[in-house]
Amino acid sequence: MSMSPGFARRVALALILLATTAALAPARAQDASPPATAQSKPAPADAEQHKLPADSTTRHTLALPGRSLSFTATAGSIRLFNDKGEPQADIATTAYQLDNTEARTRPVTFVFNGGPGASSAWLQLGAAGPWRLPMAGDAAVASATPALQPNAETWLDVTDLVFIDPVGTGYSRFVASGDDVRKQFYSVDGDVAAIALVIRRWLEKHDRLLSPKYVAGESYGGIRGPRVVRNLQTRQGIGVKGLILVSPLLDFREYSGSSLLQYVARLPTMAAAARQRKGPVTRADLADVESYARGEFITDLLKGQADQAATQRLADRVAASSGIDPAVSRRLAGRLDTSEFQREFDRANGKVTGRFDASVLGFDPFPDSSDAQFSDPSSESLIAPLTSAAMELTRNMLQWRPSGSYHLLNGAVSQQWDFGRGRSPVESVTQLREILAVDPKLQVLVTHGLFDLATPYFGSVVAIDQLPPFASKRIRLVTWPGGHMTYARDDARKALRGEVGAMMK
């Protein structure tokens, strides 16, 4: 989860809610399990100092409306080695397996968040896990009591769950020192290779290779997800039945530099934020804005500011759609950056709107400053209660007590992340095409909140519309009123659970 002007600029400095290369050590380690001799080598003393404790297995019964769920929880880790058999990182996982089920037919879903630098606590405690932390209303303040409650919308009814914290998040950590190791894991390809390997190792460890398998990711998980599935298909020998993407970013090119698509992607979300102030909004209510964004808006953008009539026309239309002062929109030539919209949306009242949920307003701490100096009122207030709740769950309810700090959001990861070099910003649409081409039965679910400015829903609409029919017809895109963590709202969380259940049935 992140915040700062211009999505492309922020992604390396901020925290977003949250493939393989043979040249990278995690990637090399994925092609086959390290030989037994390598696994049995004594780990260096410094690695043992950082080692996570042995797995903890506990049993629970959860009373929910209309049913009771008995399940086994395992909090622990999987150690990753390089191709020399040297320990590199311990990756923390939290797994929930329903009791008295047949492993061969019981689905198992591997879940991660994004960032890069976000732990899986957001999806675990917000949407899918057996326990939930309220994230809306009075519960969405930093001082809220981090008390977990049974999650009536848990996915555990239909699938076992394995939550993965990439290295540097949660309790996951490096056990090898040196910048080279960090560079390997803190990269697009090294990260994907590590996650795919963890999934395979978990399946082997728990004898679940025959189970139906699903992958779920949020936010930057839109980059990770298709690439992880592709890696599993082609490098790990693991087939995946379905991919679930929650508020995903699929293509950084939409938000890079001077790309005009960034304005197209954001406009319907800005209009949704303006209209929800007058009453409930659905995607159907935004059909006129979507049509304008695809047509006259992009046409006038392409004409450039040299065409003064086109520029004034689009600036006035953007102001009318977004609720921004027409004078401000004209000054910006109708090209509203996310942070500019956040500050101008309710500037008259000294408030800023959320990047992760544009329907949430908060105070601007420096309303008279000429510079934008505000954080995100729709996400930062959740950091304290969610961190405390994740620690309470792991250490006391699941009886797994690692030493060291728990990282819900780790800024060091995002700051050091290598998004790759060259002319092409990172994207996963290519891998989405490939995984759907190689497996004609694979299904993809994409969900978005209408008020999410971090990863606007219309960006995914445009990206999916460019796919050939064999791919697009197996992608279901659904939207609900809400923000990046759309599951914070009861109706959206219930609807998400229904979509996941329908996919797995």
Image (cartoon, rainbow, N blue to C red):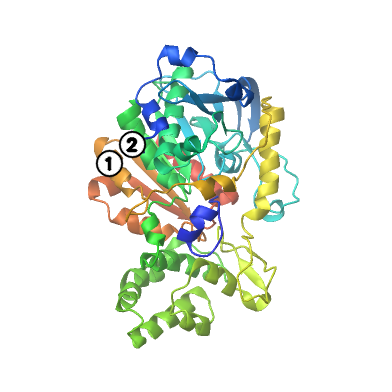
> What element does badge 2 sit on?
helix
| 300 up-or-down from 277: above or below | below
User: Can you tell which quarter of the image residue 283 is in?
Assistant: bottom left
| 182 up-or-down from 144: above or below | above
User: In x, y percent, where is residue 85?
Assistant: 45, 20
Residue labelled with disc 2: 230
| 460 up-or-down from 344: above or below | above
Q: Residue type at mark 2?
A: Arg
User: In x, y percent, where is residue 423?
Assistant: 32, 56
| 156 up-or-down from 352: above or below | above
Report how far apart the C-alphas of labels 2 and 1 lie in the structure.
Answer: 7 Å
Residue labelled with disc 1: 434
Q: Residue at 38%, 68% (x, y): give it.
A: 258
> In screen coordinates, is 79 left or right of 444?
right
User: In x, y percent, where is residue 209?
Assistant: 40, 21
User: In x, y percent, where is residue 47?
Assistant: 58, 24
Badge count: 2
> What element does badge 1 sit on?
helix
Q: Residue at 57%, 74% (x, y): give it.
A: 344
User: Can you tell which quarter of the image residue 342 is in?
Assistant: bottom right
Check whether the beta carbons of the residues at disc 2 and disc 1 lie within 8 A of each other.
yes
Q: Residue type at mark 1?
A: Glu
How many C-alpha atoms fall within 10 Å of the one at disc 1: few (<14), some, or many (≥20)? Answer: some
